[in-house]
Amino acid sequence: MGTILYFDCFAGASGDMVIGALIDAGLPLADLQAALGSLMIPGYRLTADRVARAGVSAVKFRLHEDAAAGPRGDGPGHDHPHRHGEAHGHDHGSAQAHGHARGHGHEHEHGHDEAEAHAHGEHRTLAEILALIEQSSLSARGREKAAALFRRLAEAEAAIHQMPVERVHLHEVGALDSIVDIVGAVFGLEWFGADRILSSPLNVGGGTVRSAHGVFPVPAPATLRLLEGAPIYSSGVRMETVTPTGALLVTGHASGYGPLPAMTVSRVGYGAGDREVEGTPNALRVVVGDDGAGAAGRRVVVIECEIDDMNPQIFGPLMDRLYAAGALEVFYTAVQMKKNRPGTLLTVVAAPGRREDLAGIVFRETTTIGLRYQELERACLERETVVVETPVGPVRFKVARRGADLLNAAPEFDDCARLAAERSLPIKQVQALAVQAYWQSRRP
């Protein structure tokens, strides 16, 4: 079975809504705080409060600036109730990626424009943000993902303003709250360990939004550019419902779009926007589950080809792209090919419905001119992820069962590596403490 995480963007998406939904679905706030703390940025705190949106319980994620850090107007962490005008009002300011004001609506309640907000906030350059990410405790893949998202954001803004990327000023996206949204969401999505991330079409809203540069249509320019290739629609509500950060996170992670896929649901989370919207919950819904329901989940397609004439540096990005497109397993095997040449056997395992997309990636990204594939039956243990409290911090465990029999329980390596770094301990010692804590927790 593979794990699916599905973004249900019926009311739009923003950075803080994504994180709120992940927390509601099970992401521990303490783990998120530890990951963001590794950025070594002082002067803020995070909260996750339970609120109601049109009668639906949801988590409102907020960043607050510590009083000692001084005021920043409407910039990052300003401890206000995030009054976002007529808009959805649910991004910590990341809507300024293209220079429109933070209200996300037709008129603004803030009483000052974007230029004033920028005068208050601390805005980091792209190079500074990438340096913060590189020193963080995110996994190597997480650091690469976060850096790629910020580069994409800079490229979108550069295209809109017709300037080189290195000259782009990221405005509020370079401020603390947007860094927290993007880096926090990357960490949270990796925490769930989903094999596939999918999304519904995105409800972008409508009307106009006022900025320091004038009045723009919704979706605003940066948002619309970041949504290229994704299906969008408007429910008719006259407000901005997808922010640039929301568009960036959803399109940067989703490998496909469509209705809710077949799955056995294990977790559901709702991330709240700032205000009530009449007639619908102002929230982003995240649904997590296994795609192994029924016989279809027991079948896989195996795609293979041998390659002996490709730059080996390409194999790393190729694996990342195949996993992002829904592959369950990707691995390489050294083989001896004709003319006595050493080569590499590429093997991709996936759900049968992903065959065409994955084959297209292999043909596009490699030098092979042919593939072979076959569909096979597979047997899988029942799996779940549980969090165990250890003397050095929480560790996720992958637990596998067959019926009532517990067959495997293994601590998540990334969690052990992170705690080992934080406590200056050997990783093997943290692993031993985790295993001991897990079995102690099972004693009656």
Image: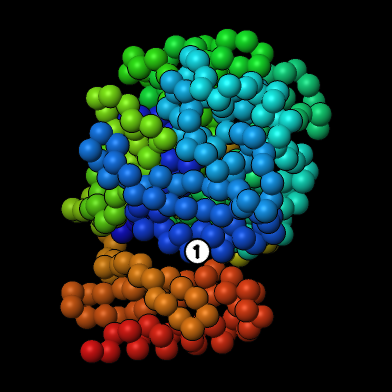
What is the secondary structure assignment of the residue under circle 1? Answer: helix
Residue 254 spot, x, y in % from top left: 45, 40
Residue shown at 72%/48% (left/top)? 130
Amino acid tagged 1 = Asp
In the image, taking residue 225 as reference, residue 444 lies left or right, namely left
Q: Left or right: where does residue 35 sit relative to residue 118?
A: left
Q: Looking at the image, what colour scheme do you see?
A: rainbow
Which residue corresponds to the image point at 35% horizontal and 89% vertical from the top-left? 440
Would you place residue 409 above or below residue 20 in this image?
Answer: below
Residue 142 appears in view: no
Residue 5 coordinates in the image, percent (x, y): 37, 48
At label 1, counting other C-alpha atoms closer than 10 Å, the crowd grade (few under 14, some 14-19, many 20 or more) is: some
Q: Which residue is mark 1?
A: 31
State the residue at coordinates (33%, 30%). Answer: 276
On the image, which quarter does residue 273 sit in?
top left
**Which quarter of the image is occupied by the C terminus?**
bottom left
Frontmost residue, 217 versus 408: 217
Closer to us: 116 or 100: 116
Residue 40 locus on image (x, y percent): 69, 59
Query: In the displayed structure, does residue 9 sit left or right of residue 114?
Result: left
Residue 93 x %, y %: 57, 33
**Residue 163 appears in the picture as rendered:** yes
Q: For the N terminus, which image quadrant?
A: bottom left
